[in-house]
Image (cartoon, coloured by chain):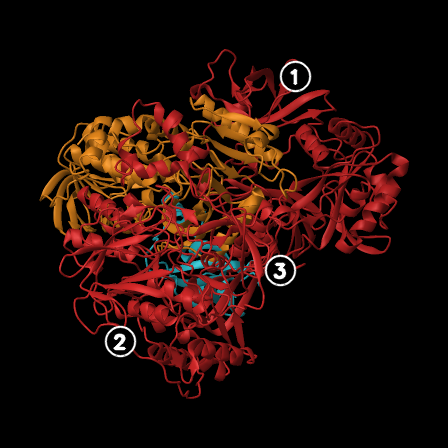
Chain colours: A orange, B red, C cyan
Amino acid sequence: MRYSGWRILKEALTGHKGWTAAWRDPEPQPAYDYIIVGGGGHGLATAYYLAKEFKQARIAVLEKGYLGGGNVGRNTTIIRSNYLLDGNEPFYEFSLKLWEGLEQDFNYNAMVSQRGILNLIHTDGQRDAFTRRGNSMILHGADAEYLTRDQIRQMYPFLNFDNARFPIKGGLAQRRGGTVRHDAVAWGYARGADMRGVDLIQNCEVTGMRIEGGRILGVETSRGFIGAKKVGVAVAGSSSRVMAHAGMRLPMESHVLQAFVSEGLKPLIDGVMTFGAGHFYVSQSDKGGLVFGGDIDGYNSYAQRGNLPVIEDVAEGGMALMPMIGRARLLRTWGGIMDMSMDGSPIIDKTHIDGLYFNGGWCYGGFKATPASGWCFAHLLATDTPHKTATAYRFDRFLKGLMIDEKGQGNTPNLH
Amino acid sequence: MTQTNRIAGGQIDRSQTLRFHFDGLPYSGHPGDTLASALLANGVRLMGRSFKYHRPRGPLSAGSEEPNALVQLRSGARQEPNTRATVAELFDGLTATSQNAWPSLKFDALAINDRFNTFFTAGFYYKTFMWPAAFWEKVYEPIIRRAAGLGALSTLEDPDCYDKGFLHCDLLVIGAGPAGLQAALTAGRSGARVILADEDFRMGGRLNAETFGIGDQTGADWAAATVAELATMPNVRLMARTTILAAMDHGIYSAVERVSDHLPEPLPNKPRQTLWRIYSRKAILTAGATERPIPFENNDRPGILLAGSLRAYANRWGVTVGDRVAVFTNNDDGLRTATDLQAKGVDVVAVIDTRPGGPLLPGIRHLQGAEVIDSAGRLGLQSITIRDAKGRVETIACTALGTTGGWNPNLNIASHHRSKPEWSDTLATFLPGAGGPANLTSAGAAAGLFSTHAALASGDETARAALETLGITAPAQTLPQAEDAPVAITPHWYVKGSARAWVDLQNDVTIKDIKLAHQENFAGVEHLKRYTTLGMATDQGKTGNTIGLAVMAELTGQSIPATGTTTYRPPYTPVSMGALAGRGRGQEFKPKRLTPSHKWAAEQGAIFVEVGYWLRTQWLPRPGETTWRESVDREVLQTRKSVGICDVTTLGKIDIQGTDAGAFLDRVYANTFSTLAVGKCRYGLMLREDGIVFDDGTTARMGPNEYVMTTTTANAVTVFRHLEFCRQCLWPDMDVQLISTTEAWAQYSVAGPNARKLLQKLVDQDISDAAFPYMGAGEITVQGTHARLFRISFSGELAYEIAVPTRYGDALIRALVTAGEEFDAVVYGTEALGVMRIEKGHVAGNELNGQSTALNMGLGKMVSRKKDAIGVALSAREGLTKDDGLRLVGVKPVDHSKAMQAGSHFLKTGAEPTAAHDDGWLTSMIYSPHMGHHIALGYLRNGTNRIGEKMRVVNLLNKTEVEVEIVSPHFIDPEGSRLRA
Amino acid sequence: MIINHPLLGPRDAQEFVYLGDAALMNRPDGLTASLQEMHDYAYLRDNPAGLHRELWYHEQGDRSWLVVTRNTVTHEITAVELARDVARAQGRSK
């Protein structure tokens, strides 16, 4: 069913009896051409683009829980393309461009809202580093803007300008950055994929991989064996667990990242802001909640919940930046499991097993990557060649010394 | 106004009257009141508006589960949005305003949304606002955003302070109702260390809201007596006004104590709230239960409350919500509301009981097998419409209705570790499931034991069992007599046929939204929540979630437990950001580390700069200097001309001793140290295991088995950690000991042609070039005080670093300045330090960016391949050793009047500004008073082979570009003759 | 979290700095190891959902490196050892 103004009106006047299911709940077929493991944002986007852009058919998405239950359902909704390195920036800029046309593309209002992102700068060294970054962004065709302290004060007069331990000296802004209603991204892709014949199979956990002669034949699942010519794994957070079925060890660790939302507040913060002197970033949702986060807890975890020190650290960052929020209340905290890779950048690559492909290692930045990740993974699955913006996301980059290390922290995943 | 709805009884102090204002109108109440009870006593039922439809709302509850009665408490900088009137303790002079209503609570323009409710269904936003494409962000979204939110922040700095604390106990009891009080009593009498925490300002839980007795006392009196006894026990800590927020790992619970929220403002030197981290060996959840309503058409009007809350207002606060009261119930507990209110003389007009049979209440119109099917009253309940067992419909005038669909145990904290609650058919609710926090058990109503007797008994037993595992035996208790009525409930999840029957009151989620979600296949519990926003309001679905699940279960034909529950996320109730941040704000956001010369520098009017947690002197302006450049240029020129002094204490210092110290250094540095002569220094380059440069610094050999390493300021801590890792985890039998001495030594650089002359005035030993040559190091004395001297140079001049025990640091800077007077010595700050190191071509933070190799820095030859050191093997990977990779170069503008900006990128002359032509970037840029123009360092692709090339550095952020020439990074004294002078 | 330090008793995990899998102690000799071996050591991880032996450093304490056996699903800690003892037991020396 296509959504339109006419349809809205008709349904409103006829008691909403005509709305149909957003997607089917099909029984799995014995075999598919493509199986995408993981019904989170990246997996659903991959299936959607495989069907829509690469005209492939016989596609299934296998999800152990519910559609959109991956980190797409558990994040701080930020989109941006303010990356530094050549391996990353074209990819994230491609992603941002896809965001910009997404709603019309999949006929679903995911509330893409480009209200801008601002990285605050507190030292001369940060100014130099952000100048380098801003120039890289522009060289890659993205937008970037340097804002002075006075310009920032005009935008957000309530920031701590007068008594800060680390004074605000300026900021790097990307006006095209912003936020998206995260669940709607999953639902829009799911609905679009379903409309194009993709079987979305929920409550179907992959429990094994059938590999013979170096080639994948299909996957064992909680609902039986399902054959496939190609299997693409997009299960960030569980990557090591799933790829262990293929006997692979990955260059990543799983870590918990907490995120936070306040009670609903009247509008205060228009765009997204990151504090450069502490672990804190914030935006305000269309419902009025301040959505914010900080650092990962820092230890390997699959528990989807964090501990108090990080919560306190984030709150300190918030209070240091915005002394008014002492009287706002934190409503809910949650934790998601991140694939923290060895250089802080993702992998979209073939494996040494024929027909088995991998997409993961998104650290805590996977949400903004969703459209491009889906597109590029679909490209790789359909054509066996990497998309031009994702050529650097290879497994062997660590062997070759071609790390994509934005933060310069090396092979210590919890520092990325 | 007068307290028209105040009735007899209650635990309020009628001897005192408190004045307060709501929306500008004056009212009065008594100590013991909440804002909600006081407003209700004054006949005010309308207290707020709902989020989406702006429906008029009054309190649903009398506790922290409240979804409706949210107000802005206080004003000015203390304004506190979304405060639940049901838990806000009344104080004299309290002011509150309504929120999410304009122009007024009674006439709210956005109530128009309610008229268009047929459009604003669940998922409406996802299907629309897409045409024309540009309108979402330009038109629709700004309108939606303007309407967003409930209350407002003041945008002023929060004037109150917050504190943090740590507590330890054998047993933490969460909730001070009958089960919690008994658990604390049993444990307290055993001598165990007990913490009893309750969110309410009055301990007792439901005992304060009920009429039945315990032993020969009222429940409230028993609670008070028990609290009094507990208060006498030194091993028991009573924490009222304290909410346990979450169960963390290993028996740690977070809690917030509202120390001052019941006062007009905090007492002097008292925090507003305190965040406690409670370390408990065992914990018991006795958090009671929360009632749920039975949704029916228009069940959200002010005056429609939970039956137990209606009863609580009467019994605890002496308030009736209306003069004519009805009750809608599916269980025996609801009947208590009718009998209690009637006993208080309130006109109970009807009890609508969904159950068809059973005994009738005496003296009350008790309609069995009946339902409430609608209500009326624009700003407050005026009547309900009922349908009796025979299908007859009748309208009954009433101004208050209590509804109850049963009680849900407050199992949130038991579920914080993602354990799945278990369904009980008998109780028609979820109970705490297995797999919760390891040290926690539940008791009382939180465990589904709803009678007072069962609560007391389970509190006692659970405490006893918990203590037993700690080896503490509690003395036997004689439990007092208490009611032990069974739960008699027939599930009745909602009134069939209703559409606009509210399940989530704050977020305006109705039965028809849930049906639509099901119709569109958002039937799983997580999809239901996310699609409709059920349970996502400030009350986190405490009253609505179970109903929503039950409705969805009915639609899908599954059982309620098969439908599942969403994850319980902390905190239990919303908690202020201030409490979580504590004192970590403003200047106290992070610790301040001051250098030994700080006091002296401050006296001179120095400008300081944040360097990590350190404050360092950035420059020292002299009278008459009006720009920072004047000061910095002077400091540089005078240092190069005569002598300058700089506090370099912040550099990391590590003493490394042992017979394997040299061998150890060979493994952690890329270059060799075991061959270094005693009494000499060497520049060391340290790699990470991935072959990237980690840190650099000079290390001196003070004796055969004794080295002193220096690190950069930024990496002082991480280098030490890394060395300990190498020592303990990789080579555990090496004889090497480490100690960080960064704080132990005050260290000053003395640089410039007159450096030796100046120092010789203070140092007791001969430091002539012959006695103390370039790169010499040794123990010396300064006027008898033990000191260390290193002849090393960051500036390129004849230079020393002299270190004395930190307590002499202040004395030494003063002595150096005095001794330097005859040379016109200057003290220079980090700016001049930076200028001189760039002139000399030394790498620092901007080049040591964690992405660069020794090869990039032009230091490739330092990496010895003859030995195994950390990072050497992986530094040889092909991607890190490309011939045309980035190399450190010097940069100067062709037109010497031009400045540049660090971070600008290199482009060939004529090349388009695109990534394909990106040749690298400027890492550091300064004005060089020595050169008389700006100079820079940069990483340039194939840079070593491009010396002499002219190109552009562009800063696309401000659209400037400068023509530059690539030069050697060593702008001054490339031969190093000054160093050796 | 609380780590029961073998020398100091139970300490809040906030006093510690986390590094990662205790396999990081098994560093090959850089002169003899192949590039692949060094790569596997530096970059690949088992990353189990379940028992995990991992390195914590008592930075705000006695500066011991510890090997903590912790369940990454429940966070339960079942063993804490001095890393130096573990290293020696694994045959590491000088």
Q: Nearer the viewer, mark 3 or mark 1?
A: 1
Q: Report the residue marked by disc 2.
A: B486
Percent coordinates x, y for residue A107 in the rendering: 25, 29
Q: Chain of mark 1?
A: B
The type of residue carrying mark 3 is: Gly
The type of residue carrying mark 2 is: Pro
Q: Report the residue marked by disc 3.
A: B658
Sooner in the amino-acid sequence: mark 3 or mark 2: 2
Which quadrant holds residue A43?
Answer: top left
Q: Residue farthest to the left?
A: A30
Estimate how packed mark 3 is, as few (under 14), some (14 to 19) or many (20 or more) residues with alpha carbons within 10 Å.
some
Q: Report the residue marked by disc 1.
A: B898
Q: Is residue A335 above or below residue A166?
A: below
Q: Residue farthest to the right?
A: B822
Question: B175 or A185, which is in the foreground?
Answer: B175
Q: Secondary structure at mark 1?
A: loop
Spatial distance from mark 3 to mark 2, Cα to Cα?
A: 75 Å
Percent coordinates x, y for residue B350 in the rendering: 27, 63
Q: Residue farthest to the top?
A: B910
Sooner in the amino-acid sequence: mark 3 or mark 1: 3
Left/right of residue B636 with respect to residue B820 in the rendered view:
left
Q: Chain of mark 2?
A: B
Q: Are marks 3 and 2 on the same chain?
A: yes
